[in-house]
Image (tube, rainbow, N blue to C red):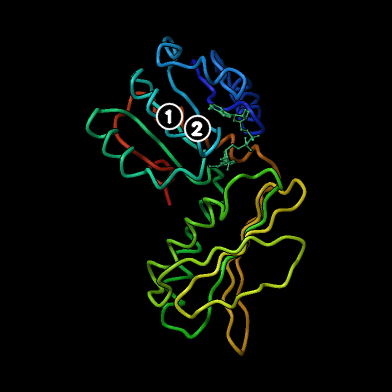
Amino acid sequence: MKIALLGYGKMGKAIEKVAEAKGHEIVYRVDLNNAFDFLPVSLQNVDVAIDFSMPTAAVDNILKCFEANVPIVIGTTGWYDQFDMIKDKCLNENQSVLYSSNFSIGVNIFYKVNKILAEIMKSHDYDVMINETHHTAKKDHPSGTALSLAKQIMNEIVKKEKIKDRLMFDNQTPSQSTKPNELLIESHREGDVMGDHTVRYENVIDIIEIKHSAKSRYGFARGALLAAEWLVGKKGIYTLDDILNF
Ligand SMILES: NC(=O)c1ccc[n+]([C@@H]2O[C@H](COP(=O)([O-])OP(=O)(O)OC[C@H]3O[C@@H](n4cnc5c(N)ncnc54)[C@H](O)[C@@H]3O)[C@@H](O)[C@H]2O)c1
């Protein structure tokens, strides 16, 4: 496949390595330095675009792919407030999008376990919270993965009506308590952590935790490439769930 990388940072470079090792060709790369040159016409001869850029750039990049009729796999998080507009446009204009807040297969197994655990815990008296830790350069919080986990939990545990987003620095003590109807997501920013997520249920008797830790970026890169290979030739809006068989 001929691939355009929209965003050529840590993830773009990891995807390039995995793609080239599989015999694909990177024919176009966009980062902050040449973003102003990027037009739909830049994507002629491209089979698929893969976007790991920035929350502020993602929607524009998707719209350019629509204009160029190029399928797009989108890993960038932090743009989901415009999801409905993108979904409508994608379906109305017969375009192709595959998005995921986390392209790691392991995290998608974790999503499945989270869903099953939440189904069990809805009839038990525990409080629940999410902890996420990422590198200090991460722009958005909570992480897209934490928000996906929260959505799954709130679908089952209806007393949790809204998210409480708390960004923590240097193990500080939280200044505000959490209300019973709030699902707390604590976001920590430390060093070069690739992505740790913990879901924690607690009552006076015990604690139940499930945790996923990414050991490198290659898990995300491999998943994104798998998604790109799958998306070419399809129309519509998809997630990784449409590919994975669990
Ligand atoms: N879904 C997943 O599995 C997953 C995994 C890891 C990271 N992410 C997300 O992917 C995004 C990128 O992550 P990263 O670690 O590579 O970040 P990064 O900061 O290393 O790279 C971002 C790149 O985007 C470029 N950029 C800036 N403006 C741009 C524009 N207008 N058009 C194109 N590129 C532009 C920057 O120059 C940089 O090269 C973030 O939103 C991150 O949260 C998602």
Q: Is mark 1 within 8 Å of ligand 1?
A: yes
Please determine whether, in this image, residue 53 is positioned above or below residue 157. above
Residue 129, position as x, y percentages in the image: 56, 71
Ligand 1 sits in quadrant: top right
Q: Nearer the viewer, residue 149 or 170?
A: 170
Residue at (45% x, 43% y) in the render? 79
Q: Residue furthest front?
A: 175
Q: Nearer the viewer, residue 3 or 34?
A: 34
Q: Which residue is mark 2?
A: 57
Residue 201, labelled with which disc? none
Q: Residue furthest left?
A: 92
Residue 142, position as x, y percentages in the image: 56, 55
* Corner quadrant of residue 160: bottom left
Please determine whether, in this image, residue 35 is positioned above or below residue 98. above
Residue 169, position as x, y percentages in the image: 72, 60
Residue at (31% x, 44% y) in the render? 84
Around disc 1, counting alpha carbons within 10 Å, would you say few (fewer than 14), some (14 to 19), or many (20 or more)?
few
Residue at (55% x, 32% y) in the render? 53
Q: How many marks?
A: 2
- Alpha carbon of mark 1 to alpha carbon of mark 2: how far? 6 Å
Which three-letter amino acid code belongs to the residue tagged 1? Asp
Residue 60, labelled with which disc? 1
Q: Secondary structure at mark 2?
A: helix
Q: Nearer the viewer, residue 154 or 113?
A: 154
Q: Residue furthest bottom?
A: 204
* Corner quadrant of residue 5: top right
Which three-letter amino acid code belongs to the residue tagged 2? Ala
Q: Is mark 2 within 8 Å of ligand 1?
A: yes
Please determine whether, in this image, residue 224 is positioned above or below residue 169. above
Q: Secondary structure at mark 1?
A: helix
Cβ atoms under marks 1 and 2 closer than 8 Å: yes
Q: Is residue 203 left or right of residue 38?
A: right
